[in-house]
Image: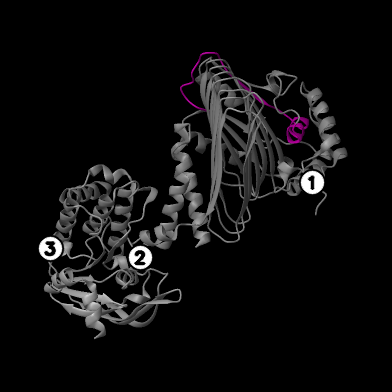
């Protein structure tokens, strides 16, 4: 058992070397608070199955270099090419965040193209003293403190009251894995003012052969009557690491539809936490994870129902092969007085190899009386009868397995919001499934 | 075309086929009848290549080729078709997609060019009309939420599109109302020609009123105990299967 921890002395020196800009005070405060906890360990119930030691090792090596050397801008030609290709494929207003730094030229382009009802600014260039527009929802999470302590920039988006954006906003968080940028902290804060509507695509990518650890924090303040459709696509190199979270605070009669697609990464941990403190809220969380080789993908979700009536529903599906391991933990907490809550959770898994492992736990904690809650989880293999049926019609074993796994994945894709990203997601999932099925059979 | 010799097959520890011999020539329609548990469905599944059944003895030759050495998909591509007794529901897989993929898998194997979406739809619509099928079923999931009759018609639709050389229909008639039975019979009869052979596995004589067989075989205890022409089917209808069992043990 490893007892790896972040080297706090190195962290302090690295933080001290960051530019003395407006964020300096917030960093210093976060650093002090982070030092009291460090990274979560497997002794925490929420982190039981996910050991962050590899991320700690990458971080310490990077801190050692950063404490003595210079921070480089990671933007290079391969990033530019990746961004150009992606932004041509998905029709959206794109903002590019490279190694945690908001690319000014993408902001300028956005300001030219998008309506004035969408405001976007980089905290570092604007000289803001706080990483978020208003109080951070998850400031006390250890990984959020780590993010703030090493923050070089943050993006703040505001969608003005009553406005509806006609195109999705694309957030391309792209990292280059070289020695100077082996660790990145990306930070986005979105404020949806009352009765506004918008779609978002948060896209995680990383390039390069070297090790990389990304720590991503996204906050979403959804004002009363506002509606958000959000997809997160994680397509990192399968040797890279990521811890990411989305925290959403929901206003009265607001809605959020969120779909998360995890295709790449070696060690991935995602948290989605939704806080429902007002009436009439509707939240739908969807997820699809595909894991091969030794990939480890952990999805934790949490819905806090503090008042009712309100509804949250959740469906995550996973396809695993080889020695991959995935974790699903979906928690709905219905607090005292949250009568009229409707909370549904489901997690379904397809195991293509007997060495793959899924740890799944849909959880309900109910302290109110008048509620409607359900949860369920399934783990299965490809249906033998269906395989024989397809093969008896002339499809090869591989084709039949691909047809069945694609159908299983399609159950999530078909429900997923943000139509502009749909065909791109289908393409990514198809390509990844070819790898999974090819490996498995 | 199909030559089955002394076939013995088991599932788990249970021997189901105990030495079955059957010869089917091009252009012929054979009916295989027999009581429940006599091995009718097992015969159909073994010929199609179901992996749960282990052949312990005997041979199955199709057009001179050893069928038992081929995967199910290879058998399908050289013209063997099994109409399932219980067609499988596959949610999320489009019915038209499967039909087209099946047709093109066969065409590729035979060195023919694949059909495009336009040609395929024209062909599928034509065959659906013949079977009196609702065209909307093309865009549904494979057998997903289909009624019993729709599922069986869908099997016949697949057969009509794939135009197999050897079609084995496993109790395609069971559970059908008279209209569906007639539609299924029409589909089967439309495929009858001098090059093709059809094996109807059935419990009842009813289907044979609409698809007239050249030969009728009675299966009992995993082998054929009696063969004859269609009058044998009428005898069975009158006297029941006990009569065959007595005759076989006599």
Q: Which residue is mark 3?
A: B209
Residue A422 image-quadrant placement: top left
Q: Are marks 2 and 1 in contact (CB under 8 Å)?
A: no
x and y, in percent, of residue B231 in the image: 11, 73
**Residue depth check, mark 2 versus mark 3: number of the one nearer the observer:** 3
Residue A168: say if magenta. yes
Question: Do badges 2 and 3 share one subunit?
Answer: yes
> Where does the image place residue B206, in percent across and percent down from the top left?
17, 62
Q: Is residue A398 left or right of residue A14?
A: left
User: For numbered disc 2, what is the local secondary structure?
Assistant: helix
The crowd level at tag 3 (other Cα within 10 Å; few <14, some 14-19, many 20+) is few
Q: Evaluate whether label 2 is on the same chain as label 1.
A: no
Q: Which mark's residue is nearer the viewer, 2 or 1?
A: 2
Which sits in the foreground, B16 or A423? B16
Residue at x 79%, y 37% (from the top left corner): A70
In the picture, the quarter occupied by the N terminus of chain A is bottom right
The residue positioned farthest toward the bottom in the image shown = B250
Q: Are marks 3 and 1 on the same chain?
A: no
Q: CA distance from mark 2 to mark 1?
A: 53 Å
What element does badge 1 sit on? Answer: helix
Residue assigned mark 2: B73
Give the magenta-colored segment's residue range: A141-169
Give the CA distance from mark 3 to mark 1.
82 Å
């Amino acid at each position: 058992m490893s007892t790896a921890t972040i080297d706090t002395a190195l962290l302090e020196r690295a933080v001290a070397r960051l530019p003395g800009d407006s964020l300096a005070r917030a960093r210093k405060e976060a650093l002090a608070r982070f030092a009291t906890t460090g990274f979560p360990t497997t002794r925490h119930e929420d982190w039981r199955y996910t050991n962050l030691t590899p991320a700690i090792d990458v971080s310490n090596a990077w801190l050692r270099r950063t404490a003595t050397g210079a921070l480089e801008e990671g933007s290079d030609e391969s990033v530019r090419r990746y961004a150009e290709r992606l932004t041509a494929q998905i029709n959206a207003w794109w903002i590019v965040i490279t190694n945690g730094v908001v690319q000014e030229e993408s902001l300028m382009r956005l300001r030219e193209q998008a309506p004035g009802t969408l405001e976007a600014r980089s905290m570092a260039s604007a000289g803001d003293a706080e990483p978020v527009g208003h109080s951070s929802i998850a400031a006390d999470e250890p990984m959020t403190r780590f993010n703030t302590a090493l923050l070089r920039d943050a993006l703040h988006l505001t969608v003005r009251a009553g406005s509806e954006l006609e195109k999705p906003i694309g957030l391309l968080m792209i990292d280059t894995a070289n020695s100077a940028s082996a660790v990145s902290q990306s930070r986005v804060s979105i404020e949806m003012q009352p009765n506004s509507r918008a779609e978002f695509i948060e896209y995680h990518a990383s390039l390069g052969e070297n090790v990389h650890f990304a720590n991503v924090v996204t906050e979403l303040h959804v004002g009363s009557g506002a509606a958000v459709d959000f997809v997160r696509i994680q397509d990192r190199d399968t040797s890279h690491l990521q811890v990411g979270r989305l925290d959403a605070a929901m206003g009265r009669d607001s809605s959020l539809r969120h779909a998360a697609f995890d295709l790449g990464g070696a060690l991935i941990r995602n948290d989605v936490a939704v806080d429902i403190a007002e009436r009439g809220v509707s939240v739908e969380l969807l997820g699809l994870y595909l894991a091969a080789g030794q990939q480890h993908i952990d999805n934790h979700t949490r819905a806090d129902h503090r008042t009712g009536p309100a509804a949250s529903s959740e469906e995550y599906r996973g396809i695993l092969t080889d020695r991959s391991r995935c974790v699903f933990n979906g928690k709905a907490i219905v607090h005292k007085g949250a009568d009229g809550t409707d909370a549904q959770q489901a997690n379904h898994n397809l195991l293509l190899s007997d060495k793959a492992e899924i740890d799944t736990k849909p959880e309900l904690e109910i302290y109110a009386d008048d509620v409607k809650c359900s949860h369920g989880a399934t783990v299965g293999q490809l249906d033998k009868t269906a395989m024989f049926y397809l093969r008896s019609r002339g499809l090869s074993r591989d084709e039949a397995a691909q047809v069945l796994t694609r159908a299983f994945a399609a159950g999530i894709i078909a429900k997923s919001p943000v139509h502009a990203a749909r065909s791109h997601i289908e393409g990514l999932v198809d390509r990844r499934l070819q790898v999974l099925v090819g490996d498995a059979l | 075309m199909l030559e089955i010799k002394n076939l013995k097959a088991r599932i788990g520890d249970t021997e189901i086929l105990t030495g079955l011999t059957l010869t089917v020539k091009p252009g012929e329609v054979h009916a295989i009848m027999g009581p429940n548990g006599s091995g009718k469905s097992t015969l159909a599944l073994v010929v199609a290549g179901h992996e749960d059944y282990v052949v312990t003895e005997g041979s199955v030759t199709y057009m001179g080729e050893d069928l038992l050495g081929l995967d199910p998909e290879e058998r399908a591509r050289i013209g063997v078709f099994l109409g399932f007794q219980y067609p499988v529901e596959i949610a999320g897989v489009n019915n038209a997609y499967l039909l087209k993929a099946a047709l093109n898998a066969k065409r590729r194997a035979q060195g023919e060019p694949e059909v495009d979406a336009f040609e395929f739809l024209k062909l599928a619509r034509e065959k659906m009309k013949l079977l009196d099928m609702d065209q909307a079923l093309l865009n549904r999931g494979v057998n997903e939420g289909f009624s019993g009759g729709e599922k069986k018609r869908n099997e016949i639709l697949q057969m009509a599109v794939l135009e197999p050389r050897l079609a084995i229909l496993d109790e395609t008639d069971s559970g059908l109302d008279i209209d569906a039975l007639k539609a299924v019979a029409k589909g089967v009869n439309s495929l009858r020609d001098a090059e093709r052979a059809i094996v109807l596995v059935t419990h009842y004589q009813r289907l044979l009123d609409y698809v007239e067989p050249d030969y009728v075989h009675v299966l009992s205890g995993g082998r054929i105990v009696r063969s004859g022409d269609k009058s044998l089917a009428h005898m069975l209808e009158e006297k029941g299967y006990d009569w065959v069992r007595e005759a076989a043990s006599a």
